[in-house]
Image: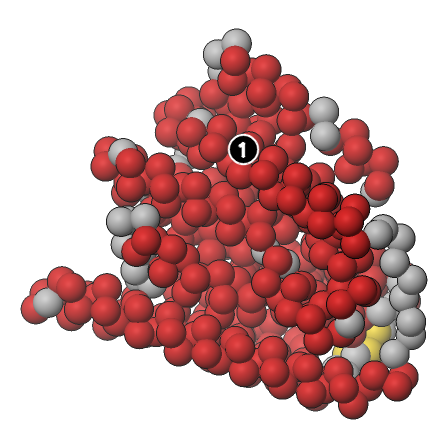
Amino acid sequence: MKYVNYGMLLFIPLAILGELLHWSPVVIFFAAALGVVPLAGFMGQATEMLAVYTGPKVGGLLNATLGNAAELIITVVALQKGAANPELREGLMNLVKASITGSVLGNLLLILGFSMLMGGLKFGKQTFDKTQAGVNATMLILAIIALAVPSFFSQTIDTVNHAGVEYLSIGVAVVMIAVYVLSIVFSFQQDDKRSEAATPHTPGWSVKRSVMVLVVATVAIAFLSEMLVGAVEPVVEQLGVSEFFLGIILIPLVGNIAEHVVAIQMAMKNKMELSLAISLGSSLQIALFVAPLLVFISLLLGNPLTLTFNPFEVIALVGATLIAALIALDGESNWLEGAQLLGVYLIIGIAFFFLPA
């Protein structure tokens, strides 16, 4: 995987060259997207190295904050471009909202499903702590309720008070972040109880190197995100797909692929509990932290984002959360359950592909 990451760095100069020589926007879009993949991986690695030096509490906070940084950067750039260009605002807003939905669906169905499939084929039945899985499942259901309430209530509120929809989204965002902070505090307490049994990990990078990699990767992702988002409109026209489909399938894969690979690797090492923690934890982070954070960032950019999702997204989120929770609650997994999750993801993906813009 390490050599694949280094090899994919070649897409960065390719994207820059394409931008300078005015190549096809489709080539620039996919080159920039593939260039983000190794950078997201390096960001995750640098964060893990810093966590070794800072200790479990600060390290956990770093991982919680920067775990989906690549996708957050891409969506912030999209919000910024939407604020600067009213003609593109609606399409890019759909891209941002779809990326939130797509990240949750991707983690719950695609990655969890693939992890259970690969781990199950290798080891048969795998087990994990059903108590922690139950806590995460409950948090996920709460997160989906928080996203669904503004989506359904806004239709009636908007007929009376348009500004009320924005205030509702802000209020929900505040509560979501508060619950997310409480979940981090709770996880810190659980980590304290297990600290004596924890296996020490030796860092491979110095603090200086870790910080430098983190800074350089962040700047590079922001730079590539400008090209990626700038090419969205021509790509939509040339390929005949919607911004919504790009956001729900491609952007989440690009921003979270490093975490996805780790989750699958852990399952294939029979560490299903860690694999489950990565996939469910990333879903919670997107729903309870990234989504509400984007609400406040959008206000600063003058391009307000409301937590109102279309009914198709809400149905998909509810369905994915319920099936993932049912599978996780018994503390056991097998390859068939993984195949079931992948089947649901494919069905949803096909449906969203044919959904009109």
> Image quarter for residue 340?
bottom right
Classify mark 1: helix, strand or loop. Answer: helix
Query: The C terminus is located in which quarter?
Result: top left
x 49%, y 43%: residue: 74
Q: Can residue 62 be seen in this view?
A: yes
Vertical side of 252 occupied by 312: above or below? below
x 85%, y 73%: residue: 125
x 30%, y 60%: residue: 306
Vertical side of 222 occupied by 59: above or below? below
Residue 352: percent from left, percent from top:
44, 48
Circle 1 Cα neighbour tier, 10 Å, few/some/many (<14 / 14–19 / ≥20)? some
**Image mark count:** 1
Vertical side of 96 occupied by 4: above or below? above
Amino acid type at image mark 1: Phe
Residue 343: percent from left, percent from top:
62, 57
Query: The N terminus is located in which quarter?
Result: top right
Residue placed most toward the observer, 169 or 340: 169
Is 61 on the left-hand or right-hand side of 129? left
x 58%, y 39%: residue: 219
Residue placed most toward the observer, 215 or 273: 215
Residue 151: percent from left, percent from top:
30, 66
Vertical side of 249 occupied by 12: above or below? above
Residue at the spot of label 1: 223
> Image quarter for residue 134?
bottom right
